[in-house]
Structure formats: structure tokens, C-alpha cells
Image: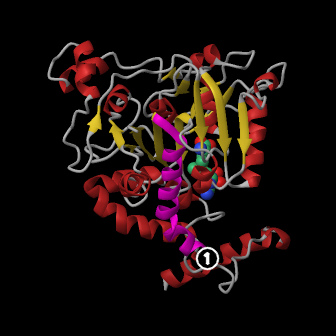
């Protein structure tokens, strides 16, 4: 009896509360007919649970929870801004993870060379040292060179403070660009040298282009993206960060071509090529229903991604000059979109174009930044930043190739 009275009182309370809420502000749930039974974010999670639990094993629950939590940003400093934000960001507790590298990195190289002094190791490895990571590809290990001009500030491990929006200087240029700090790694891996010509094949909205430009060593940069609207966004980003006098056609060319056709336009040209391909953007796909590649209507587009990615990487390889270097990257954990694409492209480059490629080890890079990022252990090809609650960056996959002919 007491329970019945309690329930009645509760129901009356709810009714009273409803009366207090004006009718126009009451929220009605969407009609069952218009609300998708399985929103794309749920489909993405189902797909990832099925595939990544097999791929990552015991690591998947930790990666999964990190992917479903708020991601962490880094502030890429803009050297072209007249107001440096460095001191201000440092005062807030941030640290440049690139400048503040781990001094233990070189001993790693010594270990890999069997304790040889650095100079002799370089000779030895240039004849392609196998690190036994894979049966099918030889890897080359080179000493790590980092551009002193790329600076990216992050809050310490476990600190999830958000960055304030950057302010424009007197010339309208912003002092930093907020991006996933792990996205800077493919640009560092590209190791741009003084006077290089560089192609950024899938460049919009332009975070990695900005990081590449910070090196201030590029002679000519070609930035391309197949999407016209995204290329417009890229232009806006460049105008917000780079002085007008540097955005001239003889220094920076902005195009909107289908990157898979690049080999038909310009072959054997660039010293460095970045191929940052469209992918399942795992973090976005788990968090946002809008523009989600796991939408039922985009199933065939999603299934064709590995083919598109392979064609883009092959086009990037053709665009590089002999001796040139190519970095392939995605923001997905998928083996099908990562290692399988690279293996297929290495095979097709040889079969179709007679181009021989060497995989360049990124172990010195991951070793150097192992305190900032959580890297996947023992990937057989390339390297991967795994999201982790204490360092919630990534996922970012990257693999570096060198054209031998
Ligand atoms: C991962 S996003 C690139 C992000 C960019 N690199 C950055 O750091 O801001 C992939 C881009 O590839 C572009 N894309 C898709 N298909 C392409 C194609 N066939 N050729 C060139 N770009 C393409 C998309 O429009 C998208 O902007």
C-alpha cells in the first residue's frame, strides 16, 4: 500500500514539473519513423568493436574508451605571426613536445647498429638494413633529423586543459593553429630539407600544410585537394597564417585535382610528397553523426576507401623524384587502410611502373616522442599513435617510403 502511495506522489510530482515547463520549451523525442534505428556513430562502434578487437587484442578496450572521450589538442606555433604565443602558452603549463625531446633517442640508434659509432652506422644502413619487422620489406634506419622551426605545444600527460582560441596579430595573422598534436608527426617524418619541392596531395583543411611551411626550408610547395569547397577552406587557413608575400604562385601552388590522376600530370618531380588520404576518420565517426562515412548511404564509398587510398599513394610515388621520399598517413586504426594499402602500393609501383621503394624506419621518431604519445608496439609496417586516456591523441598511422629509382 505504502509503495502505491509513493508511486502516486511521484507521478504527481512529475506532472507538476511538466506544468512548470512552458509548452513551447518542452522537448519531444523524434518520431520513430524519421530517427535512424542505428545512427552512423553506433554503426561505426559496432564495426570497430568487431574489427579492432581482433586487430588490437587486449589494447582495444583502452583505445576504445579513449576514442569515446574528448580528444586532446596541440597548438602548432605560427612562426609568421608577429606575436609569439610561446611564452604565454608556456606560462599556462604547456610544453613544446618537439623541442623538448628525449635525449635518450640516440642510444636507440646505437642499439640498432649493434653499438657502432653513428658515422659508420649511416654507411651501413644506407645499404638497407632489415629490422626483421616484415618478411616482405626491407627497412632503412636513418638518424633522426627534426626541423628546429616546427613547434607544437601540448599540456602535460593527463592534463586535459583546453586551449583558448588564437588571436590575430596587427596584420591579421593568427599565432597558433589547434590540431591533433599527433598529426604533426607525419610532417616531421617527411624530413623536409633546404630547397626541397614538396607536394601535399590531399591537403585540406591544411593543418599539415601549415606544419610543413613552418620549416621555412621549402623552395616550392604544391597543395592539392580534390574537394573544391575544402580547397577554399584551405585557402582561408593559409591566408590566416601565412603572409601574403609568401603566397605567390612561384612559391605555393593551390590546386583542386583528383589526386589519383597526378601521375598523368607531373611525374618524377617532387623531393617530398605527403599523402594524407581520406579514411574512416575513426574518432570523428564515433562522435559525430553528420558527414559520417558509416552512414548506410555511404557504405560503398567506405568499402572503396582502400582502393582509393592505394591509387592516391601510387600517384604520390609517381610524383616523387628518384631518391625522393613519400609519407603515407591516415587517422584510422584499420589495417586494411594502413599496412595493406602500403603493401599493395609497393607491389603495384614495381609491377606497373618499375619503381622500387624502400621502407624507411620511423623507429627513431617514435622512440624520441614515446613520452608524449602512446605508440602501437610491433607494427609490421609503419607506426601508429594509439589514443590513450593520459595522452588522448591520434589515431594516426604513418609509413615512410623512399624511391630507389
Ligand atoms: C584526411 S583529409 C586531409 C587532411 C589534411 N592533410 C590536413 O592535415 O588538414 C583527406 C582529404 O583528401 C581529400 N580527397 C579525397 N579524395 C581525394 C582525391 N581523389 N584526390 C585528392 N584529394 C582527395 C578530401 O577532400 C580531404 O580533404
The verdict on residue 318 being magenta is yes
Tell me residue 166's x, y (percent): 71, 29
Quadrant of the rendered structure where residue 224 is? top right
The verdict on residue 9 being magenta is no
Q: Is residue 142 above or below residue 400?
A: above
Residue 125 as seen in the image, left or right of residue 357:
left
Residue 24 as seen in the image, left or right of residue 97:
right
Quadrant of the rendered structure where residue 82 is? top right
Tell me residue 118's x, y (percent): 25, 14
Q: Which residue: 53% across, 54% down? A: 312
Q: Is residue 106 above or below residue 134?
A: above
Q: How many marks?
A: 1
Residue 48 as seen in the image, left or right of residue 319:
left
| Ligand 1 within 8 Å, label 1 CB | no
**SS at mark 1 in the image:** helix
Q: Which residue: 43% across, 70% down? A: 46
Residue assigned mark 1:
297
Q: Is residue 373 above or below residue 58?
A: above
Residue 355 as seen in the image, left or right of residue 246:
left
Q: Which residues are magenta?
A: 298-322
Amino acid at each position: 500500500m505504502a509503495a502505491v502511495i509513493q508511486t502516486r506522489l511521484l507521478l504527481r510530482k512529475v506532472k507538476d514539473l511538466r506544468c512548470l515547463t512552458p509548452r513551447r520549451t518542452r522537448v519531444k523525442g523524434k518520431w520513430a519513423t524519421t530517427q535512424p534505428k542505428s545512427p552512423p556513430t553506433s554503426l561505426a562502434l559496432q564495426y570497430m568493436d568487431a574489427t579492432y578487437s581482433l586487430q588490437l587484442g587486449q589494447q582495444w578496450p583502452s583505445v576504445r574508451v579513449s576514442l569515446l572521450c574528448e580528444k586532446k589538442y596541440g597548438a602548432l606555433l605560427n612562426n609568421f605571426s608577429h606575436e609569439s604565443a610561446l611564452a604565454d602558452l608556456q606560462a599556462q603549463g604547456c610544453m613544446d613536445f618537439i623541442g623538448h625531446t628525449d635525449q635518450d633517442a640516440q642510444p636507440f640508434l646505437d642499439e640498432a647498429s649493434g653499438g657502432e659509432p653513428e658515422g659508420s652506422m649511416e654507411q651501413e644502413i644506407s645499404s638497407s638494413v632489415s629490422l626483421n619487422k616484415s618478411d616482405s620489406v626491407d627497412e632503412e634506419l636513418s638518424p633522426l633529423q627534426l626541423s628546429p622551426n616546427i613547434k607544437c605545444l601540448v599540456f602535460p600527460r593527463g592534463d586535459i586543459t583546453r586551449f583558448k582560441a588564437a588571436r590575430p596579430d596587427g596584420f591579421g595573422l593568427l599565432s597558433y593553429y589547434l590540431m591533433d598534436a599527433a598529426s604533426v608527426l607525419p610532417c616531421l617524418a617527411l624530413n623536409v630539407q633546404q630547397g626541397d619541392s614538396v607536394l601535399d596531395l590531399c591537403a585540406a583543411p591544411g593543418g599539415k600544410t601549415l606544419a610543413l611551411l613552418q620549416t621555412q626550408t621549402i623552395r616550392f610547395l604544391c597543395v592539392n585537394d580534390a574537394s573544391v569547397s575544402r580547397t577554399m577552406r584551405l585557402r582561408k587557413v593559409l591566408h590566416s597564417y601565412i603572409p601574403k608575400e609568401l603566397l605567390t604562385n612561384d612559391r605555393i601552388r593551390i590546386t583542386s585535382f583528383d589526386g589519383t590522376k597526378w601521375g598523368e600530370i607531373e611525374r618524377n618531380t617532387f623531393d617530398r610528397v605527403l599523402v594524407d588520404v581520406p579514411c574512416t576518420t575513426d574518432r570523428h565517426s564515433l562522435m559525430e553523426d553528420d558527414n559520417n562515412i558509416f552512414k548506410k548511404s555511404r557504405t560503398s564509398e567506405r568499402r572503396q576507401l582502400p582502393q582509393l587510398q592505394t591509387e592516391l599513394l601510387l600517384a604520390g610515388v609517381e610524383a616523387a623524384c628518384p631518391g625522393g621520399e613519400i609519407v603515407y598517413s591516415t587517422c584510422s586504426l584499420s589495417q586494411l587502410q594502413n599496412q595493406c594499402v602500403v603493401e599493395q602500393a609497393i607491389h603495384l609501383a614495381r609491377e606497373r611502373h618499375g619503381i622500387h621503394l624502400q621502407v624507411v624506419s620511423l623507429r627513431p621518431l617514435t622512440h624520441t616522442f614515446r613520452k608524449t604519445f602512446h605508440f602501437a608496439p610491433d607494427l609490421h609496417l609503419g607506426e601508429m599513435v594509439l589514443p590513450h586516456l593520459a595522452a588522448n591523441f591520434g589515431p594516426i598511422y604513418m609509413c615512410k617510403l623512399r624511391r630507389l629509382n
